[in-house]
Image (cartoon, grey):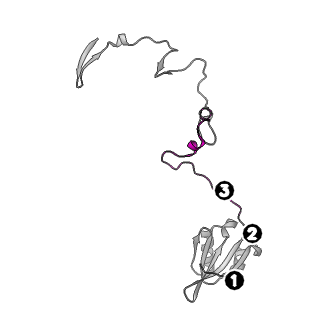
Amino acid sequence: MWTQFSQHGLVHIKSMASEIEAPNSTEAEHNGFPIGPQPGVSYPLKVLYCGECTMPLEWLVDQQGAGEEEKKRQKRGGKGMVKTKKKTEKEKRICLSRAPRGKKKSVTVVSGLKTFDIDLKDAAKFFAHKFSCGSSVTGEDELVIQGDVKDDLFDIITEKWPEIDDDFIEDLGNQSR
């Protein structure tokens, strides 16, 4: 054994030859875990993963006793698991109404186009071009066309989208927005 002076004071250093023992090749461990290839194990290892949570199946079997609430809650940053919204089958119906805008002007409100899987932005652009007026998407399933064009819409909607029948279009009359 010999001593060496460092910035932290005197340090005793043992001879490396006396410190290292020749370990068995099968008994080599680091922090309690075996090092290197193990006898009786075929390499490369094949690990099966869960299709839902992408964790190894062995880990899931070990964690069965853990609380369900703890698994579901996100503990750190990130987006977490994005849940997809289930599509509920709504009644397929298009509602047309006229709403006043000021004293003499009015707008036509069209709702329900989304139930027929019609892109509202494209429909607004089509109506604006067809009627030479302003048209915009105002809500999740609502379109506003400037001017009173409610009567013309009955023919144009069925002409443009043949899957929509006249029976699916409902006139709500004059309504306030």
Q: Residue most toward the bottom?
A: 104
**117, 141: nearer the viewer:** 141
Vertically, is 69 above or below 137? above
Q: Amino acid at mark 2?
A: Glu
Compute the Cα span from label 3 to label 1: 35 Å
Dividing the picture into quadrants, the one containing residue 137 is: bottom right
Q: Which mark is residue 165?
A: none
**81, 131: nearer the viewer:** 81
| Residue 160 position within the rendered picture, expressed as x and y whole percent measured from the top left | 70, 73
Q: Amino acid at mark 1?
A: Asp
Residue neighbourhood size for the residue with mark 3, other residues' Cα within 10 Å, grouped as few (<14), some (14–19), many (≥20):
few
Q: Which mark is residue 163?
A: 2
Segment tinted magenta in the rendering: 60-89
| Residue 156 position within the rendered picture, expressed as x and y whole percent measured from the top left | 70, 78
- Mark 2 lies on a secondary structure that is loop
Kindly identify which residue carries mark 3. Answer: 86
| Residue 155 position within the rendered picture, expressed as x and y whole percent measured from the top left | 72, 79
Of the residues under marks 2 and 1, which one precedes in the sequence? 1
- Mark 3 lies on a secondary structure that is loop
Residue drawn at (60%, 67%) of the image: 140
Q: Which mark is residue 151?
A: 1
Of the residues under marks 3 and 1, which one precedes in the sequence? 3
Of the residues under marks 3 and 2, which one precedes in the sequence? 3
Compute the Cα span from label 3 to label 2: 23 Å
Compute the Cα span from label 2 to label 1: 19 Å
Q: Is residue 72 in the magenta section?
A: yes
Q: Amino acid at mark 3?
A: Lys
